[in-house]
């Protein structure tokens, strides 16, 4: 029972921290971009549960992967890393140098060939350099792979969450229909890219401090924290 409570409290505290960070991120975005305060989400309290659940999913899937080093001498790892970086740079350049492209099919039909050519050129050049350089062979590409996996997982999480809320409650808590490279208005390039960047930064920085706090805290302390925030959150959810 003690072990179960410890695991539950640890995960709940992690959930709370990132749900709060997610709320700050979205509220800050509205303050900066629209100069207005908007209490994001469906709760009265300053928490966005999707961010908390998102991080828990990331930790569950990526924890072991992050703790193991993945080097560029592996052709699969190096190729995936290069494609991720080139696609990120190429598409970001297209976003800021063309009129807003909302349709993914239009983007692929007009710029897809250029993206493929850029990836092939850099794949050939980098992999050739890797074969000739011991430093490049031993270059750790784990963070790039983690970045890509976070990008995929958070995009899927956002899409599924939007779909469930839309189908069950007939509400659109967010609508990307006018944004760059959106898919069924549920996800878009900017949001997914920001989640990937933010998720990577959080897992490689703040998560270490949270983990250290949880390991050094007594179970009683963690239970008190969960109750103090958990009970108001349950009432908030019911309301």
Image (cartoon, grey):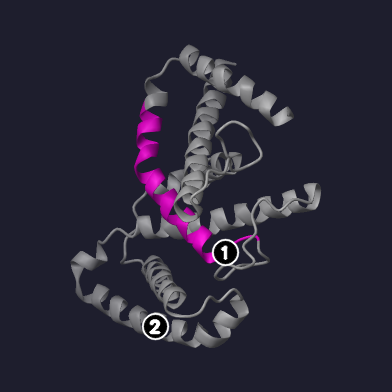
- The quadrant of the picture occupied by the C terminus is top right
Q: Which of the numbered marks, if any, corresponds to residue 188?
A: 1
On the question of residue 222 being in view, the answer is: yes
Question: Residue 59's x, y, as percent?
Answer: 49, 42
In three-dimensional space, the C-alpha distance between marks 1 and 2, rounded to whole angstroms, equals 23 Å
Callout 1 secondary element: loop
| Label 2 packing within 10 angstroms: few (<14), some (14-19), many (20+) | some
Q: Which of 20 and 121 is in front in this view?
A: 20
Residue 105: name its quadrant: bottom right
Q: Nearer the viewer, residue 183 or 73?
A: 183
Main secondary structure along the magenta-highlighted residues: helix
Report the front residue among 148 and 206.
Answer: 206
| In front: label 1 or label 2 | 1
- Residue 235 locus on image (x, y percent): 69, 24
Instruction: Tell me: 140 left or right of 115.
Output: left
In the rendered structure, find residue 118 and report the number of the disc placed on it. 2
Compared with residue 104, is residue 23 higher up or lower down, i.e. above or below?
above
* Rendered residue at 37%/20% (across/down): 216
């Amino acid at each position: 029972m003690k072990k179960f409570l410890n695991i539950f409290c640890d995960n709940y505290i992690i959930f709370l921290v990132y749900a709060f960070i997610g709320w700050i991120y979205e509220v800050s975005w509205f303050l900066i971009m629209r100069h207005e305060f908007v209490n994001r989400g469906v709760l009265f309290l300053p928490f966005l549960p999707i961010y908390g659940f998102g991080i828990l999913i990331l930790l569950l899937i990526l924890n072991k992967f992050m703790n193991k080093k993945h080097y560029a001498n592996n052709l699969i790892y190096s190729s995936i890393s290069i494609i991720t970086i080139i696609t990120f740079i190429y598409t970001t350049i297209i976003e800021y140098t063309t009129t807003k492209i909302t349709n993914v099919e239009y983007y692929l039909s007009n710029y897809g060939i250029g993206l493929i050519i850029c990836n092939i050129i850099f794949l050939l050049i980098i992999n050739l350099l890797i074969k000739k350089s011991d430093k490049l062979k031993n270059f750790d590409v784990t963070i790039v792979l983690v970045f890509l996996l976070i990008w995929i997982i958070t995009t899927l999480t956002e899409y599924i969450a939007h779909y469930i809320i839309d189908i069950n409650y007939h509400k659109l808590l967010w609508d990307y229909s006018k944004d760059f490279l959106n898919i069924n208005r549920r996800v878009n390039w900017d949001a997914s890219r920001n989640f990937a960047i933010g998720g990577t930064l959080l897992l490689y920085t703040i998560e270490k401090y949270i983990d250290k706090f949880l390991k050094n805290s007594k179970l009683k302390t963690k239970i008190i924290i969960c109750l103090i925030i958990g009970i108001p959150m349950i009432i908030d959810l019911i309301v």
